[in-house]
Image: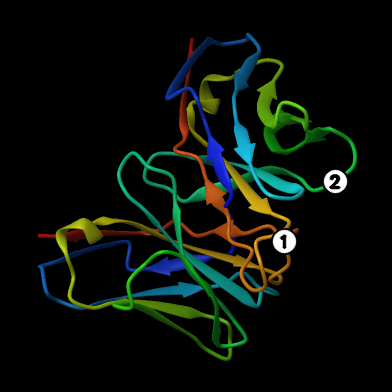
Amino acid sequence: AQSVAQPEDQVNVAEGNPLTVKCTYSVSGNPYLFWYVQYPNRGLQFLLKYITGDNLVKGSYGFEAEFNKSQTSFHLKKPSALVSDSALYFCAVRDQYSGAGSYQLTFGKGTKLSVIP
Amino acid sequence: ETGVTQSPTHLIKTRGQQVTLRCSSQSGHNTVSWYQQALGQGPQFIFQYYREEENGRGNFPPRFSGLQFPNYSSELNVNALELDDSALYLCASSRGTTRTDTQYFGPGTRLTVL
């Protein structure tokens, strides 16, 4: 079975400082990893994904994520946080061996990011 | 914003009633997945539809059912509503069903069961 853990319910960072939102995963085979962001009363917006190749993945709005196979982590990062980055962030995983069919996404519980002016 | 649309935006029902939620997929996408997001939780997979057939199901009872139409739009039906069904229901569309396909989400339907 596949699973995702986001160990921090909330992350606070000052505007202009670098931010990191943590994610660890558990899968049977090779992972396919995704980050989404959710603003209040909105659906999820896709930020970036790791499928294979370079461990540093660049995505939308200046976000990037680093895949670390030995630590089974996929942390989301941004060099300089904006107040507008304040939102709920979800990490999701899809297992290489999900079985025939849907290749469903399994999400973490989310991390609330607050960027303080 | 994605091209995925959902209706209605909000819905209030009472226990035991039935509800239908609708989703239009993004242009060029043939696969629709439905998720339930309870308050304070991450989305949980309900099921996926591809070529008008259910293509995988999460841990949800049979009273959760769905349809996909030839234009790839989809419906989620929930019978015999329970209080715990109160949640944000999210629809996501993708180009296909492979493990590398990105799912793009709609804004969701907020269902309240009283």
Chain for numbered disc 2: A
Identify the image quadrant of residue B98.
Answer: bottom right
The x, y position of residue A92, in whole percent, is 59, 45
The x, y position of residue B58, in whole percent, is 46, 65
Q: In this rendering, is residue B105 above or below A109? A: below
Please name whichever residue, B45 or B76, is drawn nearer the observer in this view of the structure: B45
> What crowding class fits label 1: few (fewer than 14 Cα within 10 Å), some (14-19), or many (20 or more)?
many
Q: Amino acid at mark 2?
A: Thr
Quarter occupied by the C terminus of chain B? bottom left
Q: How many marks?
A: 2
Left or right, A91 with respect to B12, comes to right
Identify the image quadrant of residue B31.
Answer: bottom right
Task: Using the rendered image, report if marks 2 and 1 lie on a common chain.
Answer: no
Q: In this rendering, is residue B26 above or below A115? A: below
Residue of label 1:
B99
The x, y position of residue A34, in whole percent, is 66, 44
The x, y position of residue A12, in whole percent, is 48, 13
Residue of label 2:
A52
Q: How is the image coloured?
A: rainbow
Q: In this rendering, is residue A19 above or below B101? A: above
Q: In this rendering, is residue A87 above or below B87? A: above
Residue positioned most to the bottom: B70
Give the residue at x 37% y 79%: B65
